Amino acid sequence: MIAVSTPQREIASSQATKINNGHNIQIAQQAEDYDVRELISDPEQSLRFFLLQSKFPLVFVPFISELKRLGPESYEILLKMKTFMQTLPRGFRDYDVSPDDPQDVYLLSDLCVYAPREEDGEGGFYVPKGHHGRIIPNESNTFCVQWRYEYDGWSFLGRVLEHAATVSPTDVIVEEIISLISTTLQSVDNYTAMDMLESLCTKLRLEDDVINIIGKVLMNAMQRKNVNVSVAAIDFFTALIPVLPHKVWEFLSNSNLLDRNGGGMATFILSSVEIISGDYRFTLGVIQLVNVLVKDAVIGKFSTLIEPDLRMNVLLQFARHLSYIYESFAYWKYENLSHRLDIAISISDLFSSLLLAVYGIDEATDGINKINGVLVPAAQHLLDRFLVSDGKNFRCIQPIIGSIEASGRSLQALTADPELLNRNYEWIEAALIFAEKLTRVRTLLKRAPSQLERKLFGLAPAMTQLFVRENVLRFRIMKLLISMVDSVWEGTEPPSLLAHLGPGSALTFVNALNKALEGKRDLNTQNEIARFASVVFSNKQQGLSVLLLTGRELGKDNGKQKTDKESETSLLQALEKKAEQFEDLPVELSVNVLECIALAQNSRATAVFENKTNLDFLKKNFEILDRGTGGRISGLESTDTIIRFCYNALLAARAVQLCAVELHKSIRDSTESKSIVDYFVKSGNLAKLADTAFRIQGYRASLHGNLHRNFDKKWPMAKLIRFQKTSISQKPYGPSYKYDLEMMDDIFSADPIWTGYRSEIVQANLNLSLIDAQSHLFKAWWLLIAALVEHAENNSKLLKALEQIAIQCLQINLDEGIMAPLFIPIVNDRSQLAFVITQTLHAISSASCRKQQFDFTKILSLAWEFTSSVDVDFPQALTDGYTETYRPLLRLLLVCVGALKGTKADASISQIISGILENIVSKTFMILGPDALEAFDLSKSQQGVQEWNESAKDMLLVTSLLRDCLTVDGVL
């Protein structure tokens, strides 16, 4: 006998059949198989779950709803169902009653409990002959039996869904089944998810599967404007992406969810249902779908199952759809105000993530050839919409502008609901992040300045008010201001932030910055304040520089008595006060504060107002130098040790940089300059400290060489260098400093071999962090030594120390050579510094009629040895035009040889002079002669000043060297 096939007859809601729970409770107390107390700790909830399970599928929806709350456990529960409750078909008599228990029955023939398909007779569910069941009393006249029948509940759900989707595709049963599948997919691993999907398909037609069925349900539901089922289906495809992404991409490509012209069923539901009802659950589901699609496009880069063009087209269509929503959502009706904020936040976050994925790495590659090239058309669409340089269409950027304008008023007045208030904060933060990303990407891509940026400058007063009032948003406001001030405005003067702030807001802003630097709570914001001030001092914001430096605007009368003392508070003074607490501050904050102070002291604003350095602050600076960097390092230490060394080295670099800046701007023998010179000279450790700073420790050449070679061989289409971070990405020292480890995890984590490569990339990032920190320390010491040279004329101890440093620079170049291309600038700078020092020593020696004696022979010997080394490879460097490498050495040789004029050359000097003549002079004439002669001839033939080319400049230098070589006594 066949049961009625329609699910409405066999499957009911909890109120449809009044079943006596007492009998089920007795079963629950006797049946250990149904003890779910391990899953549900509450006894009453546990009993409720069992009762619903025992009535399934007669009572359908409540049990499915309970299953959705159990997460991954729902899979095992449904997979091994042990009972099946049904209302027996009228007239069915093929059963008998047990003689021991009148409520226990058993089947005399097979019983169909769910009808097969009419067209092929397949897909039915049968309880075999001999199975026992229990009669369950109920208030209706129907005959309910709970069969003790083990079956796959997922297979049963697949069959029910197939039938219901055909008969009643918008029924609540369809919605609940799809929703359960979605929640279970999200909670189990991929292997279990695949098993579940296979189970769902076991009773379906051979040519069909549950994915196609749900796809048809989605299209049907959207046509019928059924939002509930549509949302459930969209959530299913979102949950399916990590399991079977190619199925989702293919469905989206072939469906009419969206079309090329911005229409499609998603737009139809939005315009004809959601905007009218004010309920935007479907749109929010679409946004979440796109979010997961973007992540999959990154993760599945190497998948061969999905054509890149297919992905690009789908994402571009969604980008168009979401940008339309973004420019319009603020004007819509909302029954639930949280939907408005959810749309704003989720789209802003999605757009920010998309831009970062495309432009956060692989700067040298263009267009769709980038690592995440499938995202490029969507990203370019966003840039074309949001970074318009002219025109009057501001609708796309209005949500960003509007969020900041509205926040200029108190957010407390917008809502009394704490949850909505927090979501408002999240929305403003998301808008600030998106605006920052757009600004940074615009500069990175060298696009024309945008209307968005001009509008943002105009909103400076609103941002000031927001900064003053809302502590939780200060960090993001500072990040956005940094990106605005740091942006490049090709061919035009950048907007003046001070002019847009206006007098009142400007002083309010400075006072707020000073106040924010007090205390130790919001250290992240304090970090950004220091970075903001550094960017202001480094860029074309002269008026704001003066205000931050002095506490008053350029052009104000300095002689008038100020009644408002706070308006005279200098941010520089506040930063100096903060720096004096360096022992209690995170080292990264101390680094940024000291860098800002150094840039302030060296900015053009110091030429407008006299700014004397605080001597107490200088002493604190010396304390930082006394702490050092933590000793020598090999590069093989623990992660924490390396990172700590990096920031200590960077802190020392900023302290040295401050001393260098102070020496450069100070008058010789002034109090400030004398205190700095005395600190370095009296300790007697200047040469020793410089030697430590000028040596780059811990570079692991084999690690980088092997990693690049092996990685590029393994993934030739995604070479390691392409994962270097760009200027829009954060680059803190550590495991993800240079190569974007998070992005690489997303792309390569599915490859079992990735774990080994990942460990090496972490080590490479740590090692490059170490090198970068030491490079900063080297550059700071270079500046300091160059500054000390200017104050060394009458200080014999300092002159001797400088002489030793010149020798050390050349000796280190010889010892270390050029370990990798990234060390070439450092090597060149050492040579340049040796030249600067030697030139000064020679001038002092000549002025004193050689009463001041220096070891020019030693310097010449080392300079010649390095010039003739394979690292320099002088003939090849000359041919390739590497002037930064060989020209400082030529100048150094010229100075040393000139210093030896009139002295008797010994055998070693004669050998060096001969080498110079043979390997420098002759080869330069041979390689550069024709080009230089042409430049000289051209100069003679033209009237006025003719700019000589590099070859001509080098020929003049080498000619001078030849002349001086020939004047050394004993050479000829």
Image: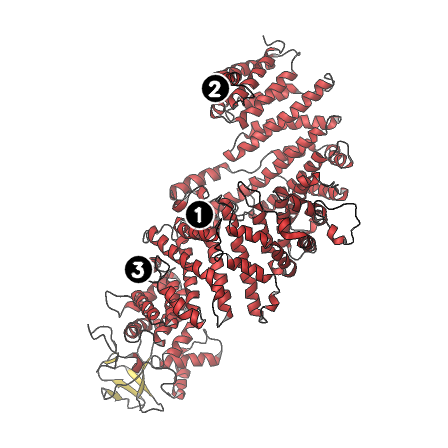
Q: How is the image coloured?
A: secondary structure
Residue closest to the eye, 120 or 574 = 574
Q: Is residue 820 above or below residue 115?
A: above
For disc 2, the marked residue is: 931
Mark 3 and mark 2 in contact? Answer it, CB < 8 Å.
no
Q: Is residue 352 above or below residue 182?
A: above
Please report whichever mark, 2 or 1, sits nearer to the chain's N-terminal start.
Answer: 1
- Tell me which numbered mark, 3 or 2, is placed earlier along the sequence: 3
Q: Is residue 591 above or below residue 411?
A: above
Q: Nearer the viewer, residue 286 or 800?
A: 286
Disc 1: which residue: 756
Q: Position of residue 70 (x, y in %)?
A: 43, 72
Amino acid residing under circle 1: Gly
Q: Secondary structure at mark 3?
A: helix
> Callout 3, which amino acid?
Asn
Q: Amino acid at mark 2?
A: Asp
Residue 634 x, y percent position in the rendering: 57, 39
Residue found at the very far top of the displayed protein: 972
Task: Identify the element where label 2 is drawn.
Answer: helix
* Residue furthest front in the image: 392
